[in-house]
Image (cartoon, helix red, strand yellow):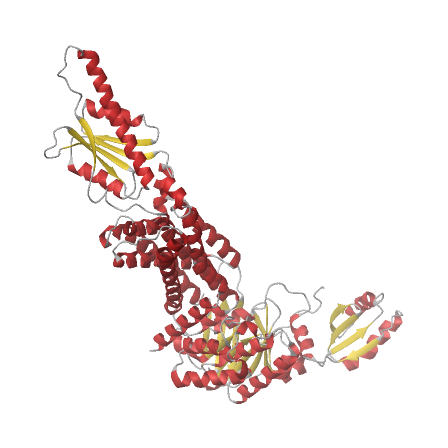
């Protein structure tokens, strides 16, 4: 009973303190709301036209002259960065290639050698990342088609040189391209809102690091920690008191940003945000990102020694995470190495999770990997922060 | 300024009270901060009887805050023991903390919360709830004289109002022992007077109060017992009257022309019966075994070398002089 009363006090004081901190509210709620509007509208057309150079393409084929020719033709396209794997036709490899495209690690995958019932010519299947903007997708498909056409033309020319005009019955090598149907091809393409709304909401979530760590520093500087240490109150109560209000503020912020992108943005001429059909997955991703952000904020708060350190290191570290994680610059316009690097940013995990729901229509299973990464990061930060906070409060 | 007064040995000024009368019993305490090379508290034994109003004095860096930190279980002693009302921290941490109310030197309040919200928050965190919490919050507002301002944020209060609220917050759980670290620093005389009156009333009601301040005049007015720390050691403890009697009756203060004061000091240092000579130009403060008997000889010796003091005063006047006699006049760094 005593602990519950103490927990209530910790929650109330933190919540009131946060709600009356105009600068923090400006940063946590108003900033993302404004940025989502501005960035979504400003980048709407640019976003659609963005063409990454080069696009990553996975080429998977069995051994053979045709495959080698096709690979060479693809590699002649400067806008494509081709990673090739030549191996006997194998379902696992195909599934892997398909998965890499689906998860956004490559823009396209060309799988040669798939046997399709009733299709006589040798067929290559092209998997396209559904998250690609429409123009990029069109460009990618067109480049692959051009490579195919080049192979066919070369083969034809070779045949003509060799046999014509004495072998009129010889046909060009049967090679044609079909774009895969189903889950990948039919998925909606992302809009500027689908990039910017979750991106800026995540940035604001992680920006709570600044007000949260400043609040802890102020408690130290104002002697409040000293008073708290002299009271019979355990550290977990005080820590829980800090987590819940910020969780609440972040959740409100996210809801506001999503609502704004869904209902206000179209009124201003922007693309409306479509949020998919998996509310449970959305809640899980949002809660995981929220906990990761709060964990990071508390961790930082236990390390920094002054408000200047809290504001400068907190803001800079969050901005770096955002820059790497595809928040400030969409991942698809990054070079391949940067895209690989983005996997280390928790904000990237959050963005991937939201876009899996918004763009690919994934459910809980689809967002599980990113959710687990976020929860793991958040839990690790919280555990370290809790240990350090407990050490700070106990007799030194 | 050079230190001219050597530090006296510890001066036990009162017979220790019986165990059952003790609010605080500190025995052979040593304390050291992490990564520090030496102890901040060295072999301190201090007893505070129930209902005492003890002034804990010491220059900057003397170890006052360290001692109070260990008493309030903020810092672990390196060795030695502390009991409060017969209880050690390790035996029952929560119960031990319930016995002590700490008012930190800084204003330990949430500036964006109102006075009532601060009192409610710290009251609950102290373990109060329900009717008892409401009763104590009302008491706290009355104690701080903030009933009419209870719904204003603390950041809008004056320094005196904040100090009073800081003290009222300490009183919420009604602990028998109050530890007040510089509770009147930086406030106006009216607020200081109000705090003193309240503390006297609390003391009359049976609270044990340990009070630190650099305002020695207010300690002299308020406290009935004094403990003096210096260099991490307890160098005096006892009743205020006894301390003053020990250190205020043996002093002669002479004022000279600044051109002659140094020569006068050199001469008087060699004189029999003069224990210490402190030079703060144009003043010389002498510690002697018997000021009235020594004074004629001192004046005669000075006249012999044609040095005449501009004024003469015999006997120290207050706690500050006793404090300087105990701790010396050298400037101290740190806190």
Left or right of A361: which side holds B68? Answer: right
The vertical placement of A389 against A81, above or below, is below
Q: Pick whichever, A81 or B291, lies toward us.
A: A81
Q: How far across and down, in percent of the image, does residue A231 sit?
A: 43, 74
Placement of the C terminus of chain A among the 4 image quadrants: bottom left
The vertical placement of B172 against A146, above or below, is below
Q: Residue at x 26, y 40 (%)?
A: A101
Left or right of B253: which side holds B28? Answer: left
Q: Pick whichever, A175 or B254, lies toward us.
A: A175
Q: Pick whichever, A36 or A269, lies toward us.
A: A269
Residue A384 seen by the camera: no
Left or right of A56: which side holds B109? Answer: right
Which residue is outermost to the bottom?
B205
Q: Residue at x 53, y 56 (%)?
A: A308
Residue A378 seen by the camera: yes
The vertical placement of A45 against B6, above or below, is above
Q: Pick whichever, A74 or A313, lies toward us.
A: A74
Quarter of the image where one finds residue A103: top left
Total numbered labels: 0
The vertical placement of B266 against B134, above or below, is above
Placement of the N terminus of chain A among the 4 image quadrants: bottom left
Quarter of the image where one finds residue B264: bottom right
Q: How far across and down, in percent of the image, does residue A299 sit?
A: 41, 57
Quarter of the image where one finds residue B299: bottom right
Which residue is outermost to the top?
A166
Q: How far across and down, in percent of the image, does residue B11 sit?
A: 61, 77
Q: How far across and down, in percent of the image, does residue B145 sit?
A: 56, 83
């Amino acid at each position: 009973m005593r602990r519950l009363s103490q927990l209530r006090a910790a929650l109330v004081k933190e919540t009131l303190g946060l709600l009356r901190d105009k600068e923090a509210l400006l940063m946590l709620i108003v900033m993302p709301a404004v940025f989502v509007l501005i960035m979504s509208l400003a980048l709407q057309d640019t976003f659609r036209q963005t063409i990454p150079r080069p696009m990553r393409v996975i080429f998977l084929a069995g051994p053979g002259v045709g495959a080698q020719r096709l690979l060479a033709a693809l590699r002649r396209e400067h806008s494509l960065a081709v990673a090739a794997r030549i191996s006997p036709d194998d379902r696992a490899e195909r599934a892997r290639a398909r998965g890499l495209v689906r998860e956004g690690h490559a823009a396209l995958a060309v799988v040669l050698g798939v046997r399709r019932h009733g299709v006589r010519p040798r067929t290559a299947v092209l998997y396209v990342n559904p998250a690609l903007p429409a123009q990029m997708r069109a460009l990618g498909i067109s480049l692959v088609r051009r490579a195919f056409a080049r192979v066919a033309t070369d083969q034809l020319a070779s045949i003509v040189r060799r046999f014509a005009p004495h072998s009129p019955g010889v046909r060009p090598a049967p090679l044609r391209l079909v774009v895969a149907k189903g889950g990948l091809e039919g998925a909606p393409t992302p809009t500027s809102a689908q990039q910017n709304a979750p991106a800026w909401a995540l940035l604001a979530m992680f920006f709570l690091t600044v007000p949260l760590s400043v609040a802890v520093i102020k408690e130290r500087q104002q002697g409040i920690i000293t008073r708290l240490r002299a009271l019979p109150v355990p550290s977990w109560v005080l820590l829980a008191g800090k987590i819940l209000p910020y969780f609440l503020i972040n959740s409100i912020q996210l809801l506001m940003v999503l609502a704004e992108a869904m209902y206000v943005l179209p009124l201003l001429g922007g693309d409306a945000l479509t949020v998919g059909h998996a509310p449970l997955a959305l809640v899980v991703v949002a809660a995981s990102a929220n906990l990761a952000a709060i964990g990071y904020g508390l961790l930082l708060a236990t390390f920094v020694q002054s408000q200047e350190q809290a504001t400068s290191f907190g803001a800079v570290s969050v901005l770096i995470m955002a820059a790497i994680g595809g928040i400030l610059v969409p991942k698809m316009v990054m070079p391949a190495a940067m895209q690989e690097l983005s996997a280390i940013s928790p904000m990237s995990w959050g963005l991937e999770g939201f876009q899996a729901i918004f763009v690919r229509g994934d459910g809980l299973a689809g967002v599980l990997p990113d959710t687990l990464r976020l929860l793991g990061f958040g839990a690790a930060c919280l555990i370290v922060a809790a240990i350090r906070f407990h050490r700070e409060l106990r007799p030194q | 300024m050079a230190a001219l007064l050597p530090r006296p040995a510890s001066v036990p000024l009162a017979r220790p009270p019986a165990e059952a009368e003790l609010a605080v019993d500190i025995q052979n305490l040593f304390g050291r901060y992490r990564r520090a090379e030496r102890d901040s508290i060295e072999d301190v034994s201090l007893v505070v009887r129930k209902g005492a109003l003890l002034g804990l004095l010491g220059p900057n860096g003397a170890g006052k805050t360290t001692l109070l930190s260990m008493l309030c279980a903020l810092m672990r002693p390196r060795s030695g023991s502390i009991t409060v009302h017969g209880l050690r921290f390790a035996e029952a941490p929560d119960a031990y903390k319930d016995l002590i109310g700490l008012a930190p030197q800084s204003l330990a309040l949430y500036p964006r919360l109102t006075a009532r919200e601060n009192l409610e928050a710290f009251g609950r965190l102290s373990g109060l709830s329900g009717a008892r919490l409401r009763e104590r919050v009302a008491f706290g507002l009355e104690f701080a004289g903030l009933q009419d301002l209870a719904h204003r944020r603390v950041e809008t209060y004056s320094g005196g109002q904040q100090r009073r609220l800081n003290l009222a917050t300490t009183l919420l759980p009604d602990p028998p022992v109050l530890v007040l670290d510089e509770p009147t620093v930086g406030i106006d005389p009216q607020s200081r007077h109000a705090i003193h009156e309240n503390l006297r009333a609390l003391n009359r009601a049976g609270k044990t109060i340990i009070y630190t301040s650099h305002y020695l005049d207010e300690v002299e007015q308020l406290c009935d017992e004094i403990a003096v720390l210096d260099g991490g050691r307890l160098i005096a403890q006892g009743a205020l009257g006894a301390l003053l009697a020990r250190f205020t009756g043996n002093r002669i203060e002479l004022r000279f022309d600044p051109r002659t004061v140094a020569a006068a000091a050199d001469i008087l240092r060699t004189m029999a019966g003069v224990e210490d000579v402190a030079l703060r130009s144009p003043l010389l403060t002498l510690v002697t075994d018997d000021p009235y008997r020594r004074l004629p000889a001192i004046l005669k010796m000075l006249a012999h070398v044609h040095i005449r003091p501009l004024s003469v005063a015999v006997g120290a006047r207050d706690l500050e002089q006793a404090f300087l006699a105990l701790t010396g006049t050298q400037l101290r760094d740190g806190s």
